[in-house]
Amino acid sequence: MSSQASVVCFLFLLLYILIESQNSDFHLAGDYLLGGLFTIHANMKGIVHLNYLQVPQCKEYEIKVLGYNLMQAMRYAVEEINNHSSLLPGVLLGYEMVDICYVSNNIQPVLYFLSHDDYFLPIQDNYSSYVPRVVAVIGPDNSESTTTVAHFLSLFLVPQITYSAISDELRDKRRFPAVLRTVPGAEHQMKAMVLLLKQYRWNWIIMLVSNDDYGRENSKVLSEQLAAEGICIAFQETLPTPQANLALTASEQEHLVTIVDKVRNSTAHVVVLLSPDLTLRCFFLEVLRQNFSGTVWIASESWSIDPVLHNYSELRHMGTFLGITTQSVSIPRFSEFRVRHSQAGPPTPNKTSPPSTCNQECDRCLNITESFNSILTLTGERVVFNVYSAVYAVAHALHSLLGCNQTSCTKKVVYPWKLLKELWNVNFTLLGQKIFFDEQGDLPMGLEIIQWRWDLSQNPFQSIAFYSPAQKHLINVTSIFWNTPNNTVPSSMCSKRCQAGQKKKPVGLHPCCFECIDCLPGSFLNQSDEFDCQPCPLYEWSDKNDVACYKRRLAFLEWDEAPTIVVTLLAILGFLCTLTILAVFWRHFQTPMVRSAGGHMCFLMLAPLLVAYLALPVYVGQPTVFTCFCRQGLFTLCFTICISCITVRSFQIVCVFKMARRLPRAYSYWVRCHGPYVFVVAITSLKVFIVVSNALAATFIPTARADPDDPKVMILSCNPNFRKGLLLNTSLDLVLSVAGFSFAYMGKELPTNYNEAKFITLSMTFYFISSTTLCTFMSVYEGVLVTILDFAVTVLNLLGISLGYFGPKCYMILSYPERNTPAYFNSMIQGYTMRKT
């Protein structure tokens, strides 16, 4: 017990409300010492009196300074309304105060308030016409007592305004229809606390709660909000509750020592205390005894501005004290009223002398409270305004119910349920604050985050932030003076924050305890999931510890690459040469040289070659469905027509010189039926069937694959089935090339002008070797090089046919015109015949 405190026993104190010049009285009652209960009551018996009831078995308590301060706030509000207000003209408010001895004396006062002057409380079916001793109650100050009292008062619909009970259970108007509050509920109190923790990135905390409804209910609300914000509770302990004489038993003291030692050795450096102030006296004395520092203590509203605890000045060395409290509203001249000494009042009429109790002024308390007057004044009268506004709310409701004007009020019975309806509708401004009750019966006042200071002559509870219930976030956040070396912000995290691109691997049961593991290349850390690295999409990539993926570079054959330029120049050269050959053959179409090369069939070969040359750009640029189809279908079809023409031409020459004599009827049938063209059409039709079948069986949609040598690059190429289809299509051309080679070899001894074995052998051999090489290469390798090789092989095969087969003939036509005559060709045939004979 503090040396400055005195030991007193507070009694039930009954005062009154008087309507002047009328035989009626209205009573307001309550207490604010160890627990608060005020009531307003009314009856019409015309007797003005003062009653005293002895509190049974009330042990000696250390005075609760804040309770006494709030009691004086109610008295001040009543006297201010009676003497200086336009409210209730002709009506004098009275009040009655009861000490509920913390939580032990709830039932007797409320039964007394509900009874008549003869202490009789009738049991009735309908209390709408019942007039209890009081018509309104202000208090008590804690949720447990408020809930107990509310169950009785709600039955009679007696208005109850609590100034300090924050339990959200009281918002249930089906259970507590008569309960109103001038303090924000637990949801907002805990929300402000959670925002404070988030403001400084504290996610590893200790929670200490009292062993009562206040501790249990508020810890549940806070735990739910902490879990939603990813803040972990290192451990939670229940503080032992002191006995009536504020002393702990031996086992309780031992448990308290264990708790403090556990706090001192914990890795969490933020302690949230959800407990009434009386439970914390012994706790902080033990903290001082064990003498440790660096802890951040976060106070709930129940003790955040307690001057007695703040008077333990050595606590400044124990760490930084922060708290949640109601908004500061200064009440003019209240500090002078609180310490004024009592004056002798008139004797109580028609009543016998009551037992000896404290008087209205409670003179024996003044010596104690005067020592705290300075700190009470500097606190900003935060909770005091809650009581002050509650009294004014009742006065405004009475003013409306009694139909008061500027000079008088009507005389009628005040039923509590009627007053309750008026209370729900009050809306006025008091000291710059709007006073009204929302749908849950709460007064939407803001909250402040405060810091305990011992080094200032001004406010010992310095405001550092403001919380608005409407906006639900902290505003006007100012710097805090941390009781740490170099004023550094204390850290309270089970694990340090991971760096960008590192995932969390849980360690133990708490999500706040984890290891940091780097995200591998090709994955990234999504902000919505800190425990798993997400793979990058197909066309994206990431480096180690990336938090986002970037677009991979798409690799395909481009125009500005050296291989593309070289092959393109060859293709242009081949196209020009083929076009020149076509012009020469067209100019010399009737000559023996052109007719011996195939006549009309030469144009059937040169046309696909020109088409193939013109379509070569499909190999360059980003692949599409069309370009992939052209690569697989168009070029192989052009090659098939050319090679089938060469093959049938080789076969036809062999037939003329070697088989015509042996099989004249077959040769005649071959000529009559236009065998060469039938063969070319049949082979071409077969190739068209193969191409169409591949197109229907496989897709030509380009695909992207990661470059095995560089994952930042995606190789964009035709579908993998492209290679299978190309192999199937090429197989027919390979068979034709082998057949053409064979027929050409068989005619190697023909006349020189008809001997094309060298040219056909050269072109067919080159086509066979290049095509098999390309198919082999494509089966074992993927990449842009495949496209380059396919492009180059295609151009070289086209050059092999156009220059290897038609080039020599064009050379003979232009260089040796004398050999391109019928006479020359006849002489060569005669010479060949004579040799064979």
Image (spheres, grey):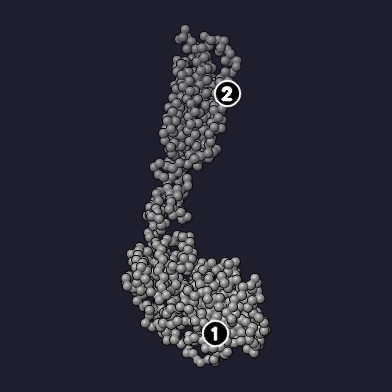
Q: Residue at x 38, y 74 (%)?
A: 247
Residue 421 vs residue 576: left or right?
right
In x, y percent, where is residue 442?
A: 56, 71
Residue farthest along the top direction in this orientation: 837
CA separation, marks 1 and 2?
126 Å
Q: In the rendered image, which residue does mark 2 sit on? A: 681
Up-down relation of residue 81 to residue 315 (above or below):
below
Residue 447 vs residue 438: left or right?
left
Please rate how many residues cluster around mark 2, counting C-alpha atoms within 10 Å: few if below 14, some from 14 to 19, many from 20: some
Secondary element at tag 1: loop
Report which quarter residue 696 is drawn in. Answer: top right
Q: In the rendered image, which residue does mark 1 sit on? A: 51
Up-down relation of residue 566 to residue 298 (above or below):
above
**The one of 624 and 550 positioned closer to us in this rendering:** 550
Report which quarter residue 774 is drawn in. Answer: top left
Q: Residue at x 56, y 27 (%)?
A: 689
In x, y percent, where is residue 203?
A: 42, 62
Query: Do the residues under discs 1 and 2 have CB atoms within 8 angstroms?
Result: no
In x, y percent, where is residue 478?
A: 44, 73
Secondary element at tag 2: helix
**The one of 461 and 184 positioned closer to us in this rendering:** 184
Q: Which mark is residue 350?
A: none
Up-down relation of residue 352 to residue 191 (above or below):
below
Q: Is residue 782 visible?
A: yes
In x, y percent, where is residue 162?
A: 54, 74
Q: Amino acid at mark 1?
A: Asn
